[in-house]
Image (spheres, rainbow, N blue to C red):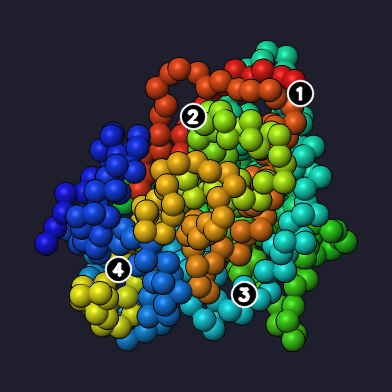
Amino acid sequence: MSVGFDPYHPEFISDPYPVYASLRTHRPIFYDEHWNLTFFALHQDVEPILRDRRFGRDIRHVPAARRVDPQVYDRIYPPQYPMWTRMIRDSFIDLEPPRHTRIRRLVQWAFSRRASQSYRRRMETEAHRRLDVARETGQMEAISEYATPIPLVMIAELMGVPAADQPQLVEWSHRIVRVFDEGCTPEEGEAAEQAIVDFSDYMRELIASHRHRASDDLLSHLIGASHQGDVLSEEELISTAILVLNAGHEATVQAIGNGLIALSAHPDQWRRWQSDRSISATAVEELLRYDTPLQMFERWVTEDIDWRGTRLRAGSKIGLLFGSANRDPQSFDRPDSLDLGRVPNPHVSFGGGVHFCVGAALAREELKVAFEVLLDRLRWFELHDTPRQRIPSLIFRGVQQLPMNLEFA
């Protein structure tokens, strides 16, 4: 049975949480004909499915691939965009063990908590530099002038990308991620394909230059990464670099923007954090839960499954509504309240299981720096009272611009 569900409706894009609440109550598991997905809205379903190996990111390695609806298969692995499919769908975020395990083992140490904390000084320097500029006018467009530069500059520097090339990385990243969304137009798909081609050519030159000089950046570490003699191929290096840019930049930018909107609506929580920096770790987790930048992830069903009375056919796809699961009152006390000291906080914003976000520690450190520098430098901030243009997507949640007035300490 189909349930009315329009993630592109302006009211949903503005605030999806009332719809999620209704779904959790009336239809927590439902099939949508337009998306050709069975959606899950409850935390008690989303969290265990993320850890269940019967659901996967890739279908091509199992017999169930023969049962996939051709239209669904072509949406996930678009044949008209062969370079995009190869570089994105064959990156380790979409692969399954043992290929996923092999590549993840080679790269995960570079994103460890210890490594991520070592990047902190670079991020702090960039955050302070951005606020120094904003102090001249007392205003800032938070997305382009603060949320974007902090992760972008840090990741670009770690990859050894010259400052002059960094704006091009942003443009490529924006184009590449559009293909993930159901609303992607043919023109956007072609632009994404060209962005992959251009980014790949750029990375080949960058990798070649790194092979002939000693450096302490992330790309050099990835080039030299090995496990029992195993190393990354050039194509694996390129796809991993694209993944680092997209995952390490797009989601973090929107998490900062969403967090600023949440804090502006809860000045008591801003003051709480400002007076007690010991809650920084839990504050970041709560901002990620309260309005996650990644609202929905898909999984393939690799075998016939009966899930709490719902029959899932091998070769079909499901949609996990992270935004709904993170507001589930069965798993969170007062889920619609922002509580920066919330413990426990079993949010699913970083996924779970073998595909738990490899860059989670880095993302947490980026968010801590972005907000702690603001807390150090500002008494308060005020968002402009103008309509906010939300990203028209079920997968990514964020705003395109966020102008604000700054009250410096």
Q: Farthest residue toward the right?
A: 214
Residue occupying image coordinates x 30% and y 83%: 303
The numbered dot on residue 317 is 4
Q: Which residue is mark 2?
A: 265
**Residue shown at 66% from the left, 51% from the top:** 281
Disc on res. 132 = 1
Q: Is residue 312 visible?
A: no
**Tag 2: residue type?**
Ala
Looking at the image, is mark 4 or mark 3 earlier in the sequence? 3
Which numbered tag is attached to residue 103?
3
Q: Amino acid at mark 4?
A: Lys
Q: Secondary structure at mark 1?
A: helix
Q: Earlier in the sequence, mark 1 or mark 2?
A: 1
Quadrant for residue 101, please give it.
bottom right
Quote the CA–CA distance across marks 1 and 2. 25 Å
| Mark 1–mark 4 distance (CA, rounded to whole Å) | 48 Å
Dot 3 amino acid type: Ile
Q: Please, is residue 165 above or below residue 106 in the view?
A: above
Q: Assess disc 3: are there few (<14), some (14-19) or many (≥20) residues with their C-alpha within 10 Å of its C-alpha.
A: many
Q: Is residue 32 left or right of residue 368?
A: left
Name the one closer to the observer, 40 or 286.
Answer: 286
Is disc 1 in contact with disc 2, using a CB cutoff of under 8 Å?
no
For residue 225, what is the image quadrant?
Answer: bottom right
How far apart marks 4 and 3 lie (CA) works out to 25 Å
- Where does residue 335 sit, x and y in percent of width and height? 42, 48
Looking at the image, residue 252 lies above or below residue 43: above
Residue depth check, mark 4 versus mark 2: number of the one nearer the observer: 2
Quarter containing the C terminus: top right
- Which element carries disc 4, helix, strand or loop? strand
**Residue at mark 4 to residue at mark 2: CA–CA distance:** 37 Å
